[in-house]
Image: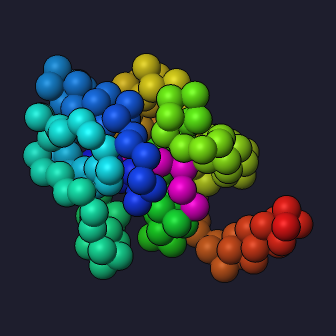
Amino acid sequence: MIFVTVGTHEQPFNRLIKEIDYLKEKEIITDEVVMQIGYTSYIPQFCDDYRTLIGYDEMEYYVKKSDIIITHGGPGSILLCLKNNKKPIVVPRQAIFGEHVDNHQVLFSERMENMKKVITVNNIKKLKNVILEYKMGNKISFTSNTSKFVKEFEKQVMELL
């Protein structure tokens, strides 16, 4: 199963939801796909299930159940994946597309990728190949070291403030 989440930010993230729906329509993705679409205005036509918003328990259920998680670049969504020993594919929201007020998700996800915690996809047209490679087992597995990561993350956030 593939779980897609765009978080709760009020700006739509049509770019991601449309691309996943297209890949499902063309049968490039054959897995079951469940999406949390937030305030996205595009309604998926080809995924197996979608919801606008979901609670924490349901979100954690889908993270645990999924073989692949595709998420926006929000720290909460990413950290939930890491907490459950999952390495997400991150498609950060970008200001140029009206998906967020700035590019902090791009910066955060690139930093997380440098730490080998996530796979970042800034160009949506590369998502197809990243998913296919991930399915073929080319993902980098890791042993969770969540508490150390959270302390380091808090330290870096405090330095920014």
Residue 37 image point, x, y percent: 29, 50
Q: Is residue 72 magenta?
A: yes
In the image, residue 158 sits, relative to residue 28, either above or below, namely below
Which quadrant of the figure has residue 129?
Answer: top left
Horizontal side of residue 2 vs 142, given as left or right: left
Residue 1 image point, x, y percent: 22, 51
Q: The C terminus is located in which quarter?
A: bottom right
Q: Residue at point 32% right, 54% down?
A: 38
Horizontal side of residue 102 vs 5, given as left or right: right
Viewer-side residue, 94 vs 49: 94
Viewer-side residue, 36 vs 111: 36
Viewer-side residue, 14 vs 111: 14
In the image, residue 139 sits, relative to residue 26, either above or below, namely below
Residue with the most extreme right position: 159
Q: Residue at point 40% right, 60% down?
A: 8
In the image, residue 66 sits, relative to residue 61, either above or below, namely above
Q: Residue at point 28% right, 30% down?
A: 18
In the image, residue 25 sits, relative to residue 103, either above or below, namely above
Give the color scheme: rainbow, by chain, secondary structure or one colour.
Answer: rainbow
Q: Is residue 19 magenta?
A: no
Residue 149 image point, x, y percent: 70, 70
Q: Which residues lie in the magenta part?
A: 70-75
Residue 81 image point, x, y percent: 46, 63
Viewer-side residue, 95 vs 44: 95
Is there any visible trace of residue 84 in the rendered image? yes
Number of numbered discs overlaid on the protein picture:
0
Horizontal side of residue 136 vs 96, given as left or right: left
Which quadrant of the figure has residue 31?
Answer: top left
Is there any visible trace of residue 82 in the rendered image? no
Q: Residue at point 54% right, 49% down?
A: 73
